Image (cartoon, coloured by chain):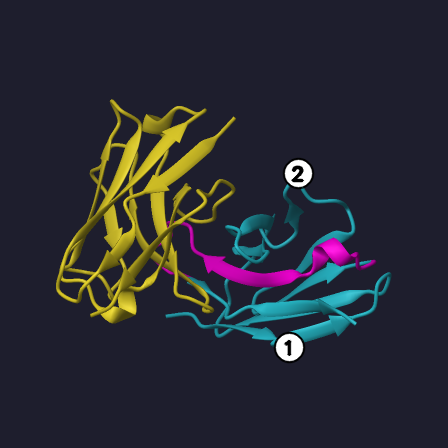
């Protein structure tokens, strides 16, 4: 069955960096766009970034453009989100999800807390 | 950017009664509309896509309708397990434009 497992979250200070990973299994990873979606505590959902199956097409929300970098390794069925210059407003649960427009499959999420 | 507005913010419904949740788009999105159910501590679950196609994991008491700017999620007979926050989400064909509503919290009365 389809499984998406995020890791890499934690507590960091403003200005620091963090790299999130998403391990995918149960489907042909290299055939699918993948998306990162976040949810601030007690708040709604925000699409952060997506990447095409080949990695050639990438999208970033304006709120993270220039600070976050999405990438993937189709050989290891892995999705990544490199987050630099983190801000307090980046505090959220980060989910990886399969697809790019709406998402049937989601991971369980990993919490990123940015606080001094 | 297309704005999605959900109403009400909180809805209290008695068990067995009908729950009607609304989602309005600031401009027409056709039927490019999805609904998600999110329970506390869990990831969202896709409930409806294409405005009215129900995901297979959900029973027939859940239905979606609407097109253009007005959409409705209906739960025909509420069960306690349906308590959750429900989000609508618009998407376009190439997903460059995609926004979520702010959510409706559904409670048992």
Query: What x and y, as percent, mark residue A95?
Result: 39, 49
Q: Residue at 79% across / 72% down in the picture?
A: B109
Residue A34 can be seen in this image: yes
Provide the letter of the chain coloured cyan: B
Pick the front one: A97 or A13: A13
Give yes or no for contact between labels 2 and 1 (Cβ–Cβ under 8 Å). no
Q: Quadrant of the N terminus of chain B?
A: bottom left
For mark 2, name the chain. B
Q: Is residue B34 above or below residue A58?
A: below
Give the alpha-carbon distance from disc 2 to disc 1, as whole Å. 26 Å
Q: Residue at 35% across / 38% down in the picture?
A: A33
Question: SS class of the residue under badge 2?
Answer: loop
The colour applied to the residues of chain A in this rendering is yellow
Q: Which mark is residue B8?
A: 1
Q: Quadrant of residue A84?
A: bottom left
Q: Earlier in the sequence, mark 2 or mark 1?
A: 1
Q: Is residue B81 magenta?
A: yes
Query: What x and y, as percent, mark residue B36?
Result: 57, 55
B34 lies left or right of A28 = right
Looking at the rendering, the stretch of residues picked out in magenta corresponds to: B77-98
Question: SS class of the residue under badge 1?
Answer: loop
Q: Is residue A25 above or below residue B75?
A: above
Query: What x and y, as percent, mark residue A22?
Result: 33, 38
Q: Which mark is residue B56?
A: 2
Q: Alpha-carbon neighbours of circle 1 within 10 Å: few (<14), some, or many (≥20)? A: some
A87 lies left or right of A25 = left
Query: What x and y, as percent, mark residue A82?
Result: 19, 48
Q: Residue at 27% across / 24% down in the picture?
A: A76
A93 lies left or right of B66 = left
């Amino acid at each position: 069955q389809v499984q998406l497992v995020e890791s890499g979250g934690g507590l960091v200070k403003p200005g620091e960096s963090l790299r999130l990973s998403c391990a995918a299994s149960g489907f042909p990873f290299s055939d699918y766009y993948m998306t990162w979606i976040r949810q601030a505590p007690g708040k709604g959902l925000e699409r952060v970034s997506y990447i095409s199956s080949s990695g050639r097409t990438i999208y970033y929300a304006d709120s993270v453009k220039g600070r976050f970098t999405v990438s993937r390794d189709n050989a290891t069925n892995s999705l990544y989100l490199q987050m630099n210059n983190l801000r307090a407003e980046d505090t959220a649960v980060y989910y990886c999800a399969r697809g790019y427009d709406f998402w049937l499959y989601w991971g369980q999420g990993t919490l990123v807390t940015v606080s001094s | 950017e297309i704005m999605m507005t959900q109403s009400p913010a909180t809805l209290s419904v008695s068990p067995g009664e009908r729950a009607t949740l609304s989602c309005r788009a600031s401009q027409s999105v056709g039927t490019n509309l999805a609904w998600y159910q999110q329970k506390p501590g869990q990831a969202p679950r896709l409930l409806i896509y294409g405005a009215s196609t129900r995901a297979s994991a959900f029973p027939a008491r859940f239905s979606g309708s609407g097109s253009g700017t007005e959409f409705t999620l209906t739960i025909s007979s509420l069960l306690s397990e349906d308590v959750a926050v429900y989000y609508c989400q618009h998407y376009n064909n190439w997903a460059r434009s995609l926004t979520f509503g702010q959510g409706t919290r559904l409670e048992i009365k």
